[in-house]
Image (cartoon, rainbow, N blue to C red):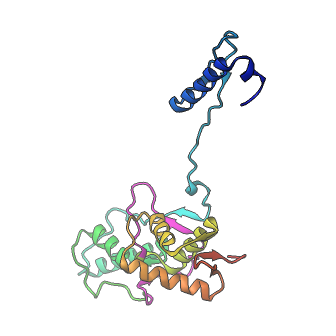
């Protein structure tokens, strides 16, 4: 800023400085200096452009949730042998496509397809695990299924432990270190949710504890979570 020009033309330099300040405040993209020495060439002010980059675009560990679509005409009366056969085939097809799928989601698919309000115990399939998930042996969980366009948010209690574990590890990796509160919020948002419920907090805490015990995560000196070298 200070140079011989300030001795030779102080008023002109002051005018130039004022223009620079006004330009910065008003977000002008050029400064036009004036003064006793005459008009000088315009001085270009660099224009900084910002481009927002979504993290989801780089998340190759996520995939869009694929929901089973029921063919028309395969919803017979479940009180008849044919209807029971249709129901059994329906459950098998949903489990095959959406495994691991929670019982709440499976039953809601059935009620929606059959147009009924209640699902009798005699119709419900067997084989759910301790968390209420039905699984197909051919479906291996190696990615996180997130809601696609037009799909509802996935409640965390309806997400299998394997998926939650992948989401937790990957978000911690992206963040380098992260506290529990922000981690929970990001995981819930990943599945389309907006609020971390008390039930979600309990589930998330259990998953985090299991990952720490397995050596996939650890806590740093401040208590934040960090990922192991290999996840």
Q: Which residues are magenta?
A: 129-156
Q: Residue at x 58, y 23 (%)?
A: 19
Q: What residue is shown at x 63% (from left), y 87% (from top)?
A: 214
Q: Is residue 134 magenta?
A: yes
> 106 above or below 174?
below
Q: Where residue 114 sits in the image (x, y, percent)?
A: 27, 70
The image shows a total of numbered marks equal to 0
* Nearer-the-camera pick, 199 or 159: 199
Q: Image check: 106 left or right of 83?
A: right
Residue at image point 77% right, 27% down: 3
Which residue is at 42% across, 66% downward? 68
- In the picture, measured across the screen, residue 153 lies left or right of residue 168, that is left
- Is 96 contained in the magenta span? no
Q: In terms of image quadrants, where is residue 157?
A: bottom left
Q: Quadrant of the C terminus?
A: bottom right
Residue 138, quarter of picture: bottom right
């Amino acid at each position: 800023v200070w140079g011989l020009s300030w001795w030779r033309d102080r008023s002109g330099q002051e005018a130039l400085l004022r223009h620079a300040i006004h330009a910065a405040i008003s977000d002008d993209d050029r400064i036009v200096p004036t003064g006793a020495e005459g008009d000088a060439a315009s001085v270009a002010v660099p224009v900084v452009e910002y481009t927002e980059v979504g993290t989801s675009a780089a998340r190759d560990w996520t995939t869009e949730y694929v929901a089973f679509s029921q063919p028309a005409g395969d919803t017979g009366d479940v009180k008849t042998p044919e209807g029971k056969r249709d129901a059994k085939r329906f459950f098998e097809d949903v489990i095959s496509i959406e495994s691991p799928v929670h019982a709440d989601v499976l039953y809601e698919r059935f009620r929606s397809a059959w147009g009924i309000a209640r699902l009798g115990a005699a119709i419900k399939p067997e084989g759910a695990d301790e968390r209420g998930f039905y699984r197909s042996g051919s479906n291996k969980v190696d990615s996180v299924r997130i809601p696609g366009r037009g799909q509802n948010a996935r409640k965390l209690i309806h997400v299998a432990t394997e998926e939650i574990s992948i989401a937790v590890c990957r978000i911690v990796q992206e963040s380098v270190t992260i506290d529990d509160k922000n981690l929970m919020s990001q995981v819930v948002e990943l599945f389309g949710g907006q609020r971390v419920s008390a039930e979600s907090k309990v589930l998330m805490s259990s998953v985090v504890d299991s990952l720490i015990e397995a050596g996939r995560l650890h806590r740093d000196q401040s208590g934040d979570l960090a990922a192991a070298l290999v996840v």
